[in-house]
Image (tube, rainbow, N blue to C red):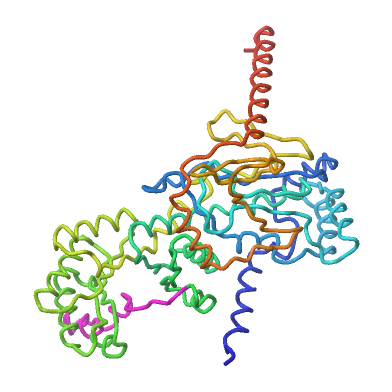
Amino acid sequence: MSDPFAAKRREMRDELFAKLFLLGGWTGATDTYKRTMWAAVPDVAVAPACYSLTFRKGLPEPGAANRLVMAGHEAMLAQWFHRPLKASDIALSLQWYGRHSATKAFPAELWDAVLAQQSGLDPVRLPVDVWGFPGGQTFLAGVPCLAFEGMGGLISYLEPAMCRYFAPVIQATKARLMNMATSRDAEFGLRSAPVEVCNLILLLARFVGGAGAAALPQLTSNDTAEFLYPELFRSIGTIGHEMMCAAQSFDKTLAAAEYEMMDRFVTRMGTASLLCDLVDAETVGLENALRVIKNHPETDRVGVRVDSGDIAGQCVLYFQKMKQLGIPPRVIVFEDEVTPEGVRKVYDTFRTQTGTEPTVLFPGAGGYWWKLVHRDTVSAAFKRTATADRPNIKFSNSPGKETLPGYIRVYGRGDTMVVADNSEAIDGEPLFVKLVDHGRVVYAESFQDQAARAERTWDRFTKWEPSPLVADHLRRFRAMRAAEVAEARAHLSSEGTT
């Protein structure tokens, strides 16, 4: 039978990634200084070049160990490559930025060269190739994760968009850390995202990082996500505080009002995670939940949910009370800003105090996924590493901020990542794949395959090193810098300016 939802699903998936494309297909989707730089040196702007994207720092969370998980190609590459640009919009950009903008500059020679390469075709594909780690690949902070090749000035335009890879990479890595703490994490927090599009990007990255080798559907409260990707997500819903409050009045007890709503929900739905903390989770809520469970012997799909106060203690309390009443084990969902460390604490407390493995416990970690999700967490850096046949380097007085020169590729050799130039023959497994070919996204792995790669590669690499050629480039550049800085200091000192 044909899928009655297929057409709508295709339309919505396309709309999702179209929303991430340049606003109106407008070439202004970059930093202003891109226009001023490449208008000033048009010959450099059109020269072939390589840029790399590097995350200089790992997540400051236990267990991360400087490791990051690649994710987000589908969303991040859509920002510039989801569809071609219109020649008419490029011409209009020239008119606005050259004559009307407060900063009147436009790299006309650069965009003329782009149009010339298209042989008059309209719309226009960007002559840019992108290489990088495939989705799910675990890599180390400090190792370039993507390389961009083409006209340098054009690649430069991409920087603000491509630095946004920090979000899905952080989220996929967080998912891996949560996966190490529990295989039962659930995402309940659609409202924690700035907009729904961000929540969808988060969920896709979470699937890549945390689904594991089996790549089973992940739980979510985002109904759109389940419709768009039913093979990846499964919806979960139960009682909220708003329903629990609805029966309250001054002519009945709070306990009676709470019980009424619990009972009505279970009677109608047959399943629930009873929200027990409206009045007090350890007294009134406890009694009401146990009463509802006992009064509905027709279903064993009624458990409880605790999300305030002493979470670990409440998990033990509910488990022990149900056991005393002869109620078979029921799922106990616990929330309240759960982190991987928080999950371990609850699990350890449960084991210690009950002598039982915490198989009935189910963590919900809505707020965790957005903590530390900003560029500075991983120090995302998009830098030029080559122009024509010349390696380039960005020096820094801060450790770890010096770029690796050349047309970057990365290989795996044992537990080591080797950062090389594409001209070298490296004894190792090529880890970069082509993501974009002359402006067309060619990477199309399934999310399940990406999730399986995250599982395979998480523990593989513990260190990285430059290849012989990259190491030689670094040595020569560092020697040049040291000599010239020393000479400049001597000049300044002799002139009495230092």
Q: Is residue 169 left or right of residue 290?
A: right
* Residue at the far left in the pictured view: 324
Query: Based on the displayed image, in which of its 4 quarters is residue 45 positioned?
Result: top right
Q: Residue at coordinates 9% horizontally, 74% vertically from top-left? A: 324
Q: Residue furthest bottom?
A: 1
In the image, residue 397 sits, relative to residue 325, either above or below, namely above
Using residue 162 as the reference point, say whether residue 264 is left or right of it: left
Side of 464 relative to 389 (left or right): left
Residue positioned 25% across, 84% down in the render: 261
- Decide which of 24, 55 is in the foreground and name it: 55
The picture places residue 331, in percent across and down from the top left corner, at 25, 73
Q: Residue at x 46, y 57 (%)?
A: 456
Q: Nearer the viewer, residue 413 or 181?
A: 413
| 276 horizontally vs 380: left or right | left
In the image, residue 485 lies at what x, y percent? 65, 19
Identified at 59% across, 36% down, the residue is 466
| Magenta extent | 233-262
- Residue 245 in the magenta stretch? The answer is yes
Specify whether residue 157 is painted magenta. no
- Kindly indicate the quadrant of the structure image that contains residue 54: top right
What is the x, y in percent for residue 252? 17, 84
Spot the residue most to the front: 427
* Image quadrant containing the C terminus: top right
- Placement of the N terminus among the 4 image quadrants: bottom right
Q: Position of residue 5 (x, y in %)?
A: 57, 86
